[in-house]
Amino acid sequence: MNRTAWTGIGRALLTVAVYAALFALLYGTSVHSPKVIFALLGVGYLLTALLWEVGGNALLAVALPLLALPLLPWEPRSWGWALGFSLGALVVGGTIGALRRRERKSRPTPKQPKQYPEDVFRRAFNPMLIVDPSGRVLDRNERAVELLGAVKHISEVIHIDDLERVRGEMERARTLGEAGGFTLRAVSWDKETFPAELRLRRLSEEEIWIELRDLSDRVELERKLWEAEARYRYLIEDAIDTLDTGIVLLDRDRRIIWANRTLGYLFNLDRDEMIGEDLQRLLWKVKERLPEEQTLERLLEAEEENFVFSLKPCPAQNGHGNGNGRSPLPEERILEFRSIPIETERYRGGRIDHYIDLTEMKKLERELLEKTRRLEESNRKLEEFSHVVSHDLKQPLRTIQAFTQFLLEDYQDKLDDQGVKFLESLHRSSVRMKNLIDDLLKLSRIGTKREPLEPVDVGEVLSEVRDDLGATLEGVELVLPEELPTIVANRTRLAELLANLLSNAVKYNDKPHKRVEVGYEEGPREFVFYVRDNGMGIEERYREKIFELFERLGPADDPESTGAGLAICRRIVEEWGGRIWVESQPGEGSTFYFSVPKRPGGIRLHENGHDRHPGRPDPDDRPHSAAAAGTGTAVGVGAGGVGAVGPSRPPESEPGGSDGSDSPATAQAQSHSEPEINP
């Protein structure tokens, strides 16, 4: 209760106490004289009339005579006294009450303290109102005046359709202390509606605090976000529509939520008519186009395992299309079915079915298989032809070699010097022809015959090659590293590669003390090996030419030189995905480098370990210098000086040089044993 209520209760209790004492006195003394009774009641009335205003005094003026009737004698005179007292009390009490009311109104009303912080209320960012239970605005902040105007009632700022709800929330706030937290339509000073969030709080029995939070900016952002989401959603749907894969989204009940146009094209159905249809009913429409009855069941069950099935062609009925802007399927299609369950935080239980069109891929696969078969058949016939030709060519060569040898041994004394020279030249040419046929056979086998790639210890292979070249390396200082890595290569081809490079380094060395060094450097993705000699060196204009087939820089009558040795080396290295090149200074020696990938990155292995497609390593993997400084093992001692070659960065554009040719078929080489340079 407030202070006013407590004051009223006190006056009532005092009034009751005064009259209780008077009536107790009257009843206790048994006074029956009207003069005495009304005199005492008049004194009490004057005392209590000062406590009440007009209404209270009028009530006492009527009630006191009635309460005194039991004490009065039953005679007309008593009724006259009672009536006279009542009239006199009305006049006197009314006068006193009127004077008291005037005096109360003339007193200044004490200012009630506000139930909210004044500064915060005035400067708040959101519009705030203080209203009474009827909705009359008692106070407003600056933001409310700016946005809503000088409103006097809550109905001026709330849309008429939301006003009844606001009134209910006001009653709820008076009962519970606070209410609101919902969105409604507010009205600004210029009669424009805007979305707002309403919050109410009870300050007192007569005051309710109302806050309106303007949501215009948030609603505008939400609208833009929705438009952006819709735009991107349509963009994604359009992108999915362009795929060659039919895609359908299903809910828990296997009803179609969405499908792309490709699915309608494959099934010859209108995509829009599929939405909301049961999957079983949809597949039943294309049942006749499925070659096997089990296919329909597997499509409905959607097991985790993918499977491939064929879809028979379905021409348009009555000359009409399928509603997807594309003609019906003119031929049988091969599809792969794949189903992915939807298991996300927002949705569980549905699935996404994919119908991947493999028709073109299967055609290409069949064509590729046919081309592969023809290529293998061609390689087989080429290999047979090579063997036949080599046999047919070697047979007369062996005959020529044998008869020239017989003539030189048995009839040399019967021939003059010129005849002997002719026979010796014929013998050397036949030997060179035989070596040339052997090298051509080796070159033709590289790349046309699948050879297994396996981890190979380069140190073991180099040791075997050194033993095989024992006579060639006699008197040569051979420097080898303490350790050599294991690479992925073909063991036989690696031995052939190293034997070619070592024999060339020894054979075409014009120094008294021949020195050959073998080493390697390890890069991020490849190993780079080198064979360095202190021989005669190679001029820059010949550094590419020596890798070409039948190109020789030495004497033309050298029977052991065929001009195919380095071509074989290049073909071997490129089949592994590496490259080969030379760095040299005339008169100081040469360094032949070749790289081998650490992993078969440029070499694609079959399941049985065979290589399939050679590639190239990244040029950035090349080390800046392939020369290795360190301790080595010297094998063989010769006389003479020692030459050194300063390394430089290998060519960037080409494994063997800078002429731009990278085809293995054009990779050429010097002889099995490299000829000398004949300036």
Image (spheres, rainbow, N blue to C red):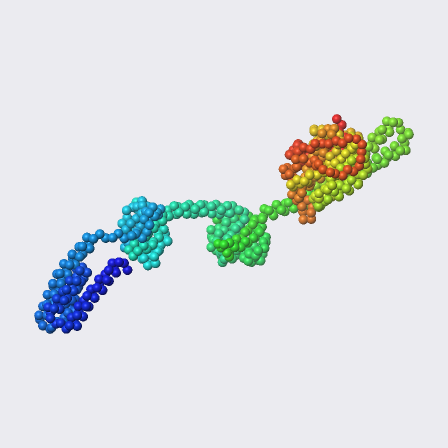
The answer to whether 397 appears left or right of 275 in the picture is right
Residue 289, picture quadrant = bottom right
The answer to whether 474 appears left or right of 28 in the picture is right
Tell me where residue 182 appears, x and y as whole percent.
Answer: 37, 53
Residue displayed at 71% across by 29% down: 585
The answer to whether 171 appears left or right of 392 in the picture is left
Residue displayed at 69% across by 33% down: 647
Q: Is residue 446 visible?
A: yes
Residue displayed at 34% across by 48% down: 120
Residue 172, picture quadrant = bottom left
Q: Compared to 438, does 72 lie above or below? A: below
Tell me where residue 384 appears, x and y as whole percent.
Answer: 75, 42
Q: Compared to 73, does 334 lie above or below? A: above
Considering depth in this image, is 671 or 519 the residue closer to the camera? 519
Q: Is residue 70 visible?
A: no
Considering depth in this image, is 55 or 318 the residue closer to the camera? 55
Considering depth in this image, is 246 or 552 the residue closer to the camera? 552
Residue displayed at 16% across by 57% down: 98
In the rendered image, the quadrant that contains the C terminus is top right
The answer to whether 423 appears left or right of 645 in the picture is right
Tell me where residue 160 appears, x and y as whole percent.
Answer: 30, 52
Residue 18, picture quadrant = bottom left
Tell me where residue 601 appears, x and y as whole percent.
Answer: 65, 43
In the rendered image, the quadrant that contains the N terminus is bottom left
